[in-house]
Image: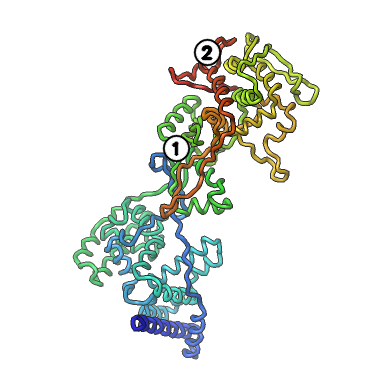
Amino acid sequence: MRNDTEPSKLAAGGTLLLVSALLGLVSAFLIFPVFGGVGLAAKAAAATFDSLPTDLKTPPLPQRSTLQTDDGKYLASFYSENRITVTLAEVPKITQQAVISIEDSRFYEHKGVDTRGILRALVRNQQAGGDVQGASTLTQQYVKRVLLEQAVQSGDKAAAAAATDKNKGRKLREIRYALALEDKLSKDDILGRYLNIAYFGAGAYGIGAAAYVYFHKSVNQLTLAESALLAGLLQSPSHYDPFNGNGSEAISRRNVVLGRMAQLNVIPEAAAEAAAKEPLRLKRSTVPNGCLKSQYGLFCDYVRRFLLGDPSMGPTKEAREARLFKGGLVIKTTLDPRLQALADTAAQKTFSPTNRNVGGIVVVEPGTGKVKAIGESRTFNQDQNPYLTNRQFQTGSTAKAFVAVAALQKGMPLTTAINSPHDYKSPIFYDKFPGNPYPVQNDAPGMHGLYDMRSGMAASANTYFVQLAERAGIDNAVRAAIAMGVSDPVIDEATGQKEFDSYLSDPKGHGAFTLGAAGISPIDMANAYATLAARGLHCTVSPILSVTDRTGKPLVIGKPVCKRTIAQDVADAATEALSWVVSPKGHVINGNTGGGAAIGRQPVAGKTGTTQ
């Protein structure tokens, strides 16, 4: 075993000494052109070299995260760097050879540093009177990209500048890391890593993304001419960018690569000549970043906001953003394309996209919390306020369901009958200030008489439900709403005050809650009614079915939490009352309000609501 390893150490040591000496020589020429001092400079360089770190910390490369519909179809992508990670086995041999031929033809011969190349660069640069540039091996280039990636991910601007500085210190650091790296990794490992981290221009990071961006194909389909073009871009992606009017420059550079491959006998001269005659045959392909160009932009944006606010994605917003845009997640959402199409059509029938009013639909699956569709009449714009998921609106008479649940929880049956005049002034609730009775009236002049909970719900009798709320308590109605899924967010971080604190502390001053005066988002209302449909089982809403990381490992992110918050008999009774809104099973004074929602013999329950 020792006999096998010692020669390698000696070889590496010899390379290290030679590199140190060469760097000393370079330093001598640059700093002491008149007096020389080569030996002293070489010793100083060697000492400095030995003190440099050798353990290269390689951060995970940013990967594109992908959103999918519930049936696995593409929805959108999020990324900071457009990258498709590939294995070296997926990269055609001819592509690997093209890169090696033009960037580091002695890659498989040196130990991370090409001493011959350094000498050539030394002579060339001294003749030109410039600094020491060129002669970087693929291993050194990989080290440079890793150091830059480290700096970018940590937000260290000084380190990012140091990783790209054109000076001897940077070169020395790269060489030290490169030599150590070659002791740890095989040549193929280094080449594979380099091909995934290298920048090829046009926003393409790595050979996988480059194949797609320039030719709309997988990397394993690259031809000789295409491989040579991509390899040629590495030297200066912007200068040779064929998309920015630099087609002739790109072709010239491609042909230089082909010529070098022929010179090294990697390919026959005839193959190089034939490939050099080919047109570029570019097929630019872009991967939209974010939701703006997604077919389901509104739903996509809801998922984005949901994930950035979900602690299971990370402890801070910055951590969550990094995970979404760099983590290579595959996020299968709850979006049902069929239901989404129906929701869009229905919303757009309500108002035109240019109307200042907005029609919207949110579909939440009872018993799971899955958000199946979000439809809106407006054309999606990522900068607009997300009305259906964040914006709070007065809910009108749909809030009567909360009063009904509170009354049922207190033991009042559906047959609870109350004489309800057209006009009523509550002796319990006050308007604006205590002692001023809260006035309420029914919608139509003929709406008065004896109502119970079912007929009152069907007719949406305001005076019935205000009286029912007097008996049940507005505070209990608010608690029922929260238990069913209505958010009670903190509105003052300094005091910890929540949205409904005033309703709970002063219920008599909020009789208008019965008629929907409180601001509630459409998605919360959909979820509250879904709790009743699930017979009292409440689930937190989520647009997430599953999440896997870049390795395919399942992650626990966005999972709904389900628990019974309303007794089953109470939920069933409330649902029966709500079914009368659509299909009454008895006499209703002035008729029911939701007959238009009937679906044949399909049981339907719901509530109409109007507000200004």
- Name which residue lies at 36% across and 53% down: 213
- Name which residue lies at 45% across and 47% down: 547
Q: Is residue 412 above or below residue 521?
A: above
Q: Which mark is residue 476?
A: none
Q: Mark 2 and mark 1 in contact? Answer it, CB < 8 Å.
A: no
The residue under label 1 is 335
Q: Is residue 589 above or below residue 258?
A: above
Query: Position of 126 compared to 583: left or right?
Result: left
What is the crowding at mark 2: few (fewer than 14 residues within 10 Å), some, or many (at least 20)? few
The residue under label 2 is 585
The quadrant of the image that shows the N terminus is bottom left
Q: The disc labelled 1 sits on which kind of residue?
A: Leu
The quadrant of the image that shows the C terminus is top right
| C-alpha span from label 2 to label 1 | 35 Å
- Residue 546: percent from left, percent from top: 45, 45
Res. 64 visible in picture: no
Residue closer to the observer: 579 or 495? 579
- Dot 2: what SS? loop
- The quadrant holding residue 506 is top right
- Dot 2 or dot 1: first in sequence order is 1
Mark 2 vs mark 1, foreground winner is 2
Q: The disc labelled 2 sits on which kind of residue?
A: Lys
What is the crowding at mark 1: few (fewer than 14 residues within 10 Å), some, or many (at least 20)? many
